[in-house]
Image (spheres, rainbow, N blue to C red):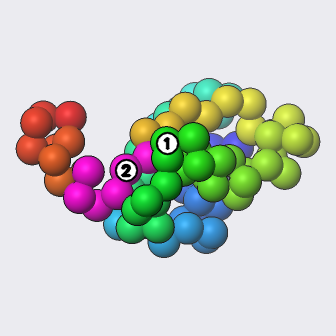
């Protein structure tokens, strides 16, 4: 699994205004900004992303993913603060 594949899988199931994925082939970090996250808790947001990747976690093809999940408004605030 590579970063482009993880990015494609997330983008294929979730409309993203911003999507960044970094990793070493086993451990990945993602920044996912989607208006679909509005009104959802951090846990629900992460569950939505994990659901897209569940088959790859289950098969062992994807080992670990840490993520920051933000709405576009939160992303603007976070970016303005130097996030």
Q: Nearer the viewer, residue 13 or 44?
A: 44
Closer to the eye: label 2 or 1: 1
The answer to whether residue 6 of the structure is visible from this angle is no
Q: Nearer the viewer, residue 14 or 59?
A: 14
State the image quarter where residue 34 is shown. bottom left
Contact between labelled residues 1 and 2, with CB atoms less than 8 Å apart? no
Which numbered tag is attached to residue 74? none
Question: Where does the image place residue 33, in percent across and percent down from the top left?
Answer: 38, 56
Look at 43% across and 59% down and name the residue there: 39
| Magenta-colored stretch includes residue 73 | yes
Question: Where does the image place residue 25, in percent across and percent down from the top left?
Answer: 64, 33
Look at 55% across and 32% down and name the residue there: 66
The answer to whether residue 2 of the structure is visible from this angle is yes
- Tell me the CA gap for discs 2 and 1: 8 Å
Q: Nearer the viewer, residue 60 or 24?
A: 60
In the rendered image, which quarter contains the C terminus? top left
> Dot 1 corresponds to which residue?
42
- The disc, 2 or 1, on the residue closer to the chain's N-terminal end is 1
Q: Does residue 68 appear left or right of residue 62 in this picture?
A: left
Q: Which residues are magenta?
A: 69-74
Q: Crowdedness of circle 2 by 10 Å Cα count: few (<14), some, many (20+)?
A: many
Q: Is residue 2 above or below residue 19?
A: above
> Dot 2 corresponds to which residue?
70
Q: Does residue 50 appear left or right of residue 75 in this picture?
A: right
Question: Where does the image place residue 48, in percent across and percent down from the top left?
Answer: 63, 55
Secondary structure under badge 1?
helix
Question: Where does the image place residue 65, in percent across and percent down from the top left?
Answer: 61, 34
Q: Crowdedness of circle 1 by 10 Å Cα count: few (<14), some, many (20+)?
A: few
Q: Nearer the viewer, residue 6 or 33?
A: 33
**Residue at the extreme right:** 59
Look at 63% across and 69% down and name the residue there: 13
């Amino acid at each position: 699994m590579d970063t482009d594949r993880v990015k494609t899988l997330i983008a294929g199931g979730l409309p993203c205004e911003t999507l960044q994925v970094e990793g070493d082939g086993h451990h990945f970090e993602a920044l996912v900004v989607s208006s679909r996250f509005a009104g959802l808790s951090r846990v629900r947001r992460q569950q939505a992303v994990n659901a897209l990747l569940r088959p790859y976690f289950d098969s062992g093809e994807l080992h670990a993913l840490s993520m920051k999940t933000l709405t576009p408004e939160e992303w603007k605030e976070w970016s303005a603060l130097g996030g």
